[in-house]
Every structure is written in structure tokens, then in C-alpha cells.
Amino acid sequence: MSDKPIIAFQGMPGAYSEQASREKIPEGSYLSCKSFEDVFVAVEEGRAKIGMIPVENSMAGVVSDSYDLLAQQNLHIIGEHFLSVRHALLALPGASITDIQSVYSHPQALAQCHSFLKSHPWERMSVYDTAGAAKDLVVRGRLDEAAVASALCSELYGLDILAREIQDSHMNTTRFILVSREPQDPPPGVPCKTSLIFEVRNIPAALYKCLGGFATNGVNLTRLESRPVAEKQWSYHFYLDFQGRPKEAACRLAMEELEFYTTSLKVLGCYPESPQPEVVIEG
């Protein structure tokens, strides 16, 4: 039996979530799941040790499904990872750019490569998944078709890379979180983030009062996001990330003030803060 930790991710093999898993935990083995919910279930049932979940993208914004599942499930955030999204144009071996007539990918990937694709007379075809678009090239076997996907897909499916770095923005970054059944205490001395979810009391300026303790205690917030509460009309959860640990004096005071103005408060995890990737422009 392998001692490698199993990392569950959403998408076909070669998806950017798998690439993030490989970057963060190169010694792992990787489990492809159809949906985000399947990732959570795989971790809850013990079929995977860790789930790799995208929560926000610098170009497309928040991944709503991920936040909703964090509210519904009982997994703990134990880490984060920032992935630089680098799109490549893939085709069957022997194909050339002059052969291509149509390009397949997820709508967001096609949009993120707008300038490159616009410079060629290709028909753009939207599909459910970047990695799935690459895999389907092999199934159809057409030399006049290409896919926009990760370079990892070229290795997994035996495809040629006709062009690299075709995305419009070299700052395109996706933030992932790592979830597990058990919380983990970060090592001492390591800069940390804490993530939590709360509902505010029905009083004037409740959210303002919830956040006031962070300002007065000098605790930096890195994310605040609202999502509707299931089965509660016009009610909202707030997801909050801050730099620090709940046991630190300033953070503890801020959370005590927050809790006073909430009807529910749940700490999702305290975990080491990951550095964001440097922007490297090739060419």
C-alpha cells in the first residue's frame, strides 16, 4: 500500500486543480473528482487525506460553490496555495498551427486567451473543462482541432504544445485552499492566516461593529465575502480571512468583539500563509 498522501481535486486529470496539487504536495498521489462536492465527500470518507479547492481567481473572482460547501461541510482548512495560471495551445502530434480550424476549452479559459485567439481565424468552442477539452482531442483524433489547457495535459495525454503562455494577463492567479478532516496547528513562528464564517445579529451597523475589533487591534483582513444562507431568506454568511492566529492577543480580542455581534461563529482553520507567485513575463 502506498504511503503517498492522496489529494482529491475537481476536474479531469490535468486540470489546474491537479497542477496546484502537484505543486503544493509533489510527493502525493492525485484523485480526480467530478464536482467540488465529490472532493469534500472523498475527504470526509477517508478516500483522500486532503482536498484541493479553488476559492478565488484574480481575473474571474470568487468560486461561489467552494464557499457554500465550506459552510455546509465540517472540514478544516489546513493550508493555501497560489497557482499562476498559464494556458497553452495543445494539439495532436503532427498538427501545426496552420492546420487548426477550431479550438476547445472552458469559457473562462477562452476568454482569458482572447487576444491570442482573436489573431487567428479559428472557431472557438466552449466545453465543460480545460482538461476534458484536451482529453477529447485524443478521442476525436482530428489534426484540425486544438485545446486551451495546462501544459500538464500535454504530458498526460500525449499532445504537442503549439504555443505557450497564450493568456492575456500574466497576473492570472488562482488561490486554492487545502481541506482535511482534522485541523492542524501551524508550526511556531510561521506567518499564518485564519479563516472563519459568521452570521451577524439583526441590529443596526452589525457588520461594521463586527469588523471594528480588527481595526482597533491592528489585525489585517485579507478577504471578506458574503454568501446567502441556505433556507434562510435574505440572510447571509460572511467569510473572513485575517493574518494571525486566534490565540494571539490582538486576534483574540478582535474575535471576542466579533463574537459579541454574531449569532453564529465558526473558525474554519488556521494555517501557514503562502506567498503569492512572482509575475514573470517571458518573451
Image: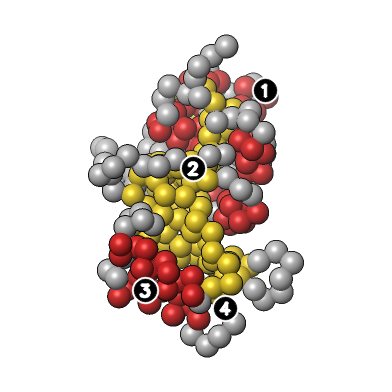
Name the residue at 53% across, 34% down.
50
Image position, residue 59 (x, y; %): 44, 55
Left/right of residue 260 with respect to residue 43 in the rendered view: left
State which mark lies toward you, 4 or 1.
Answer: 4
Residue that badge 2 annotates: 183
Relative to 253, say whether 116 is above or below: above
The residue sitting at 57% across, 78% down in the picture is 201
Quadrant where the C terminus sits is: top left
Q: CA distance from mark 1 to mark 3?
A: 57 Å
Which residue is tagged 3? 213
Marks 2 & 3, CB-CB < 8 Å contact: no
- State how far apart marks 4 and 1 are (Cα): 55 Å
Give the crowd class for mark 4: few <14, some 14-19, many >=20 residues within 10 Å.
some
Image quarter of the N terminus: top right
C-alpha gap between disc 2 and disc 3:
25 Å
Is disc 2 in contact with disc 4, using a CB cutoff of under 8 Å? no
Q: Amino acid at mark 4?
A: Arg
Label 3 Cα neighbours within 10 Å, binned few <14 / some 14-19 / many ≥20: many
Please tell me whether mark 3 sits on a helix, a strand or a loop: helix
Q: Which is more N-terminal, label 3 or label 2?
A: 2
SS for dot 2: loop
Q: Of tags 1 and 2, which is closer to the observer?
A: 2
Rendered image: mark on residue 236: none
Q: Is residue 41 left or right of residue 184?
A: right
The mark that comes first in sequence, 4 or 1, is: 1
